[in-house]
Amino acid sequence: MTSAKSVAEPDNGLDKTAPAYPGNPVNPPKERHGLRRRKELVGRVRRNPKILVVAIVVILAAIVGGLAYWQNEQSRIYVEKSVISAPVISLGPASAGILDHLAVKEGDKVTKGKTVAYMADGSEIKSGVSGIVVSVQNVPGQVVSPQVAVVIVIDTRELRVVGSVEEDKGLADIRPGQKVVFTVDAFGSKEYAGVVDSISPTSRQSDIVFSISDKREVRQFDVKVRYDVLAYPELKNGMSAKMWIYKQ
């Protein structure tokens, strides 16, 4: 009687305990590849523990950086709608008369008391402030009245960054003297320093917005920021800006 001989199956290195896969009864190719990569990574870390240390440091740095950024954002109020602005002074005659000639042109700097125009009757129109001429009515020979601005001057000493803040977007946390950092669109990301000078006691009637949640009117208030005009001579009246007001 001939006994049956057992034939050993070839060992092809596959995990025979793994679940079947269509077309391949043992480990799927993707699983084998992922397992091999994990083993290689573990082996690399064991051979060089510094890799693990570096990875931990990078993760911790990312966590700390994210936390610092979040805390910084919580400590300040962002005001997007801002503009560099100065008081505008209109200069005209004390009484109606004929304009003889102007003594200034747009862009001229004037000092307080300087004559900016002469009337035909010999009277003069003088500037009440020091500043820059931004507009003139060059109409010699025509009659001008006290209501007509022959020359318009801005008081550059009073240049401010004026931001519009909605009443529910941090207005209650703003106080005079708080630190402010602002940027001006014309100069990219360059940062300028200032302090809160004043908060308007009344809202801007022309800029009423509505809350999406309950359709209530949301009022906007002007916040004026003072800065060193002499330190930033490049900042001009009318330039668009953005600012961040620090709560502390």
Image (cartoon, rainbow, N blue to C red):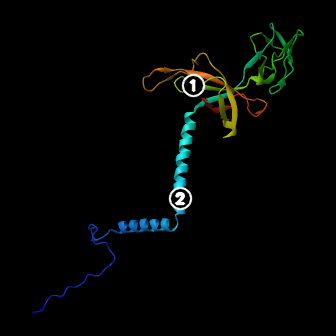
Can you tell which mark lies on residue 245? none
Q: Amino acid at mark 2?
A: Val
Taking the image as shown, residue 101 lies to the left or right of residue 178, namely right
Q: Residue at x 66, y 34 (%)?
A: 182
Extreme-right residue of the structure? 122
Q: Of label 2 and label 1, which has the lower sequence position? A: 2
Residue under label 2, please give it.
Answer: 53
Can you tell which mark lies on residue 173? 1
- Give residue 184's position: percent from left, percent from top: 67, 35
Answer with the quarter of the image where residue 191 lies: top right
Taking the image as shown, residue 189 lies to the left or right of residue 130, namely left
Residue nearest the observer in this picture, 56 or 245: 56
* Label 2 to label 1: alpha-carbon separation: 43 Å
Taking the image as shown, residue 18 lies to the left or right of residue 171, namely left
- Give residue 109's position: percent from left, percent from top: 83, 25
Answer with the quarter of the image where residue 198 lies: top right
Q: Amino acid at mark 1?
A: Asp
Extreme-bottom residue of the structure? 1
Residue nearest the observer in this picture, 242 or 50: 50
Residue nearest the observer in this picture, 60 or 77: 60
- Give residue 102's position: percent from left, percent from top: 85, 19
